């Protein structure tokens, strides 16, 4: 088990500081504007919470569609609440046991929980970078995310999940290495 509470709280705090004028801005996710990234975060939270509870249905059976990310009218209150529910769902030990489903794929609960953490942390960084906000990550989160993206990158390109790995300096921090393996330039603008 990894702890998702701090990562979800950190990303929810970022949402509090997104301004309407930020919506059209670009993000490290080349295909997504700030508004689309916020909508993606708002959609992944209930999907991964359902996966933790093993409540299979539209939330767990449907792959994300980059062209369908639309902000809900109540996103400023709802998305932070969804992130809190996501963290709470993964606090249950049985969330990590057995099989679950996310984006139409069956996988071990342990893997889904780690993917959820990676999504929250990496997209939290994306949002912070796009909106000029600071973003610090706990060492435990960094180690879990780095381990996950290293394993994914070793299997080759993961279409729709990460971009091609970006070269990184020898003095890069573990989090910078994780970002680079996910296709992001951690020191770029």
Image: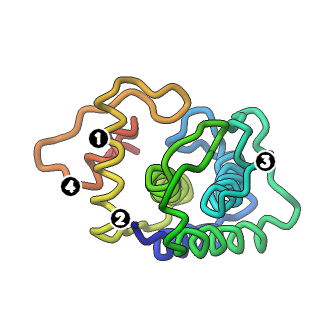
In front here: 82 or 177?
Answer: 82
> x%, y% of residue 37?
64, 48
Which residue is denoted by mark 2 in the rendering?
141
The quadrant of the picture occupied by the C terminus is: top left
**Which residue was labeled with disc 4?**
173
Q: Residue 163 location, x and y as percent?
A: 44, 30
Query: Disc 3 designates what residue?
Result: 57
Q: Classify mark 1: residues with Cα within 10 Å, few (<14), some (14-19) or many (20+).
A: some
Residue 2 is situated, as x and y percent measured from the top left of the image, at 40, 67
The answer to whether 161 is drawn above or below residue 189 in the figure is above
Q: Element under label 4?
A: loop
Quote the CA–CA distance across marks 1 and 3. Answer: 30 Å
State the SS at label 1. Answer: helix
Point out the frontmost of discs 1 and 4: 1
Q: Which residue in the protein does label 1 denote?
A: 150
Q: Earlier in the sequence, mark 1 or mark 2?
A: 2
Q: Residues within 10 Å of mark 4 (few under 14, many from 20)?
A: few
What's the distance in space between the residues labelled 2 and 4, CA to CA?
13 Å
* Nearer to us: label 2 or label 3: 3
């Amino acid at each position: 088990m990894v702890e998702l509470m701090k990562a979800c709280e950190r990303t929810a705090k970022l949402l509090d500081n997104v301004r309407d004028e930020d919506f059209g801005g670009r993000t490290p996710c080349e295909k997504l504007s700030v508004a689309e990234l916020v909508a993606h975060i708002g959609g992944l939270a209930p999907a991964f919470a359902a996966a933790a509870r093993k409540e299979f249905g539209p939330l767990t059976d449907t792959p994300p569609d980059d062209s369908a990310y639309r902000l809900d009218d109540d996103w400023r209150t709802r998305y932070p609440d969804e992130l809190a529910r996501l963290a709470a769902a993964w606090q249950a030990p049985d969330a990590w046991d057995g099989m679950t489903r996310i984006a139409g794929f069956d996988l071990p609960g342990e893997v889904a929980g780690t993917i959820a953490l990676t999504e929250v942390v990496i997209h939290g960084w994306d949002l912070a970078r796009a909106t000029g906000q600071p973003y610090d990550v706990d060492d435990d989160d960094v180690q879990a995310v780095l381990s996950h993206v290293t394993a994914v990158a070793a299997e080759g390109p993961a279409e729709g999940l990460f971009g091609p790995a970006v070269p990184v300096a020898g003095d890069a921090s573990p989090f910078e290495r994780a970002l680079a393996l996910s296709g992001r330039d951690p020191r770029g603008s």
